[in-house]
Amino acid sequence: MIILKSERELKMMHEAGKILASCHNEIRKMINPGISTLAIDHFVEQYLAKWGATPEQKGYKGYKYATCASVNDEICHGFPNKKPLKDGDIVTIDMVVNLNGALADSAWSYAVGKISSEAAHLMKIAKESMYKGIEQAQVGNRLGDIGHKIQTYVENEGFSVVREFTGHGIGRSMHEDPAVLNYGTPGKGVKLREGMVITIEPMVNVGMWQCKIDENGWTARTIDGKLSTQYEHTVAITRNGPLILTDQELS
Ligand code: MF3
Ligand code: CO
């Protein structure tokens, strides 16, 4: 069941999104060779507390951390750990912020020190594919329009989109209907209506799209060991077009 949001609920989610976005802007300044993803995780928890918000991921289905931190071949749901990030790594930090019961979800990828031109290109295409998807988040369009744009943009560059994980509706819970696939057929799927809020979060791989799950039961990584990256925004469907609730430029 898709839950449409009122003006007031949207405002509350936007407030959560602004905190989330400003948190990413702080993380950007911290990312350097030598810092650990656990240190970033601790920072996030403190930062959110300062703004009266909480990390929704912590405790979700037994997940122990405020953030997911996925490095290099890790696709998503990487556990923050004490290992220092090193020059040339790419890392995706994903988090869900709860402010007074309203949620926002955004993942962003960061380059650690100097990265390869392949990694830089992957990050650029993944980010652009997310914005191509967001452009399609218009009243009357369908989910297939979003997925199709993302997939064709990524595949034209020779990269692949992960199939096992999708975007989702979001509101008072982290995962609501509908599932937002990063591939699809134009004109197919759920029709977008005013008041829907979804995440658009393509995971893009250099090589094959398939993943395997670590022994920890959570962390997904590429089966070929090649790089993967991800960008994610929470987006409201409004009569004036897509409204990015986690926009870092407004935070
Ligand atoms: N933020 C993730 C998403 O985009 C969900 C993380 S799973 C968790 O859907 F368990 F770590 F919370
Ligand atoms: Co997320």
Image: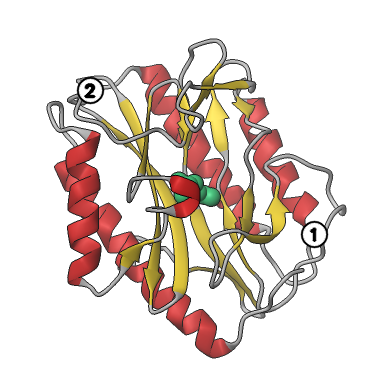
Please state which of residues 35 and 229 is positioned toward the viewer in this rendering: 35
User: Which residue carries the number 2 mark?
Assistant: 114
On the image, which quarter does residue 241 sit in? bottom right
Mark 2 Cα shell of 10 Å, populated few (<14), some (14-19), many (≥20): some
- The mark tally for this picture is 2
Q: Is residue 167 left or right of residue 225?
A: right
Q: Is residue 157 left or right of residue 149?
A: left
| Ligand 1 closer than 8 Å to label 1 CB | no
On the image, which quarter does residue 114 sit in? top left
User: Which residue carries the number 1 mark?
Assistant: 142
- Residue 224, compared with residue 181, is above or below; it is above
- Residue 243, compared with residue 61, is above or below; it is below
Tell me the CA gap for discs 1 and 2. Answer: 39 Å
Mark 1 Cα shell of 10 Å, populated few (<14), some (14-19), many (≥20): many
- Percent coordinates x, y for residue 161 in the rendering: 63, 31
Residue at the limit of the structure toward the left, as seen here? 34
Q: What element carries label 1?
A: loop
Please state which of residues 180 and 176 is positioned toward the viewer in this rendering: 176
Q: Is mark 2 on a helix, strand or loop?
A: loop
Give the residue drawn at x 18%, y 32%: 36
